[in-house]
Amino acid sequence: MINVSTPALWLIVLIVGLPQLSETVYTPSLPAIAETLKVKDEWVEYTLTIYLLSFGLGTLFWGILSDKKGRKPCMLTGFLFYILGSLGCYFSDSYFLLMLSRFIQGFGGSVGSILGQAVCRDSFHGPSLGKAYSLIGCSLAFFPALGPLVGGFITQQWGWPIIFLFLIIFGGSVSIVTFFKLPETLNQSNKKLLKLLPLFLQLSKDSKVLGHGLLVAGCCGISFSYYAEGPFYFIEFLGLSPSEYGQTFLLIAIISVIGSLISKKLQDHYKPEKIVKYGIILMITVSFIWVALTLCLTFIKFSPNLIIAISLACIAGIMAGIAIVTPNTLALALKGYKHSIGSASSLFGFYYYTLISLFTFGMGVAHNGTLLPMPLYFLMISGIMLIAFRFILLKRSTN
């Protein structure tokens, strides 16, 4: 069943993809930004943490407001904040201004993620929702992977500030298309501001929501920790140029899309819960292999090219697992909250983006100038996800 005012899926993909691209497009320039602003490496990694934290606050704000004012006007207002934040990043000549601008950019950009998903839930139902979320899963996987490819090229050719000029142009273009092409999908009879405290208490007691939120946060926490730590891992430690590092994301983008397509195909044969289980097992297995191979470097000296190849193969396997887990988890998380999907989505988004920012902050804390922290950290997060699935979600589904 599809809503009468059904938006084009390609437009939803663009709307959801814009903030995802902004999270990662500048990551190949992190070493250059640290050098330009004369700050420590881990401090520059925290510009991603502040973006994710403000992103979480934005999901709370825009989702709740959209239940009263509608999806489209909130989306256009949020994009305006996003463009202003990107403008501030472009002119940043200090660490403080960059952090402040990233906060504004994340707050505005979050509207694309939270309301893109709300529009999808407004418009699609049943099997159509799962398949629509598989395409959103492609967007969630592809755009962050595309970002470093574009950012690495721009950084090497023109310098890191031009990355934010690119985002201003891209954000403005998406805003214009949204203004002309996006229908209002919120049912007028549901256009009201719900009492948040009862909804918050209901969500906070729902182990299914908490468990799925932890799985989404784990997947995104690994992805964004990689985008934060990866430039130092490959550029500073293994000697790749920013452009070469960006090019490695062609592989990750392809693998992520393949993982999303596999997830879509598996939906024809398996329940989403089983697909999620398979994805987590893939993530934890590859993470363990990566840690073991990294520890081998203590005893066996591999060439940098071999280390690069092994690392890319492992991160590709982890990203494939993430692409399988994420869309199925998002589709399952708020099944019982159709009556308040905007507010529920905003509270849910605030919850898991807060966890994501903590996971990303943890990666910055773990940074110690060696190759081991990143794969070890990913193994730890994957283990937490497996525990959550086994003892929270699996137990709940069998009751």
Image (cartoon, rainbow, N blue to C red):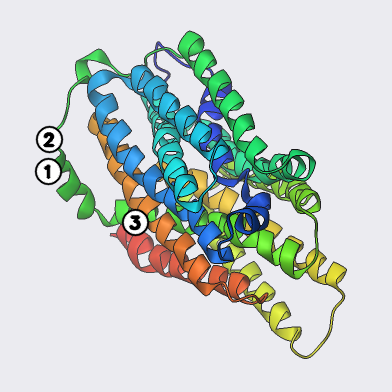
Residue 125 visible = no
Please provide percent x and percent y for residue 368: 59, 76
Q: Earlier in the sequence, mark 1 or mark 3?
A: 1
Mark 2: amino acid: Lys
- Label 3 and label 2: CA atoms lie apart by 29 Å
In the foreground, 287 or 157:
157
* Quadrant into which the C terminus falls: bottom left
Q: Would you identify the image quadrant in which residue 347 lies?
A: top left
Q: Residues within 10 Å of mark 1 (few under 14, many from 20)?
A: few
Q: Would you identify the image quadrant in which residue 238 lies?
A: bottom right
Asked whether, in this view, residue 368 is left or right of residue 304, the answer is left
Mark 1: amino acid: Pro
Q: Which residue is mark 3?
A: 397
* Quadrant into which the N terminus falls: top left
Q: Which mark is residue 195?
A: 2
Image point (46%, 67%), residue name: 362
Image point (66%, 36%), residue name: 162
Mark 2 and mark 1 residues within 8 Å of each other at the beta carbon? yes
Work out which residue is located at the far top of the displayed protein and give it: 180
Q: Earlier in the sequence, mark 3 or mark 2?
A: 2
Q: Which residue is mark 1?
A: 198
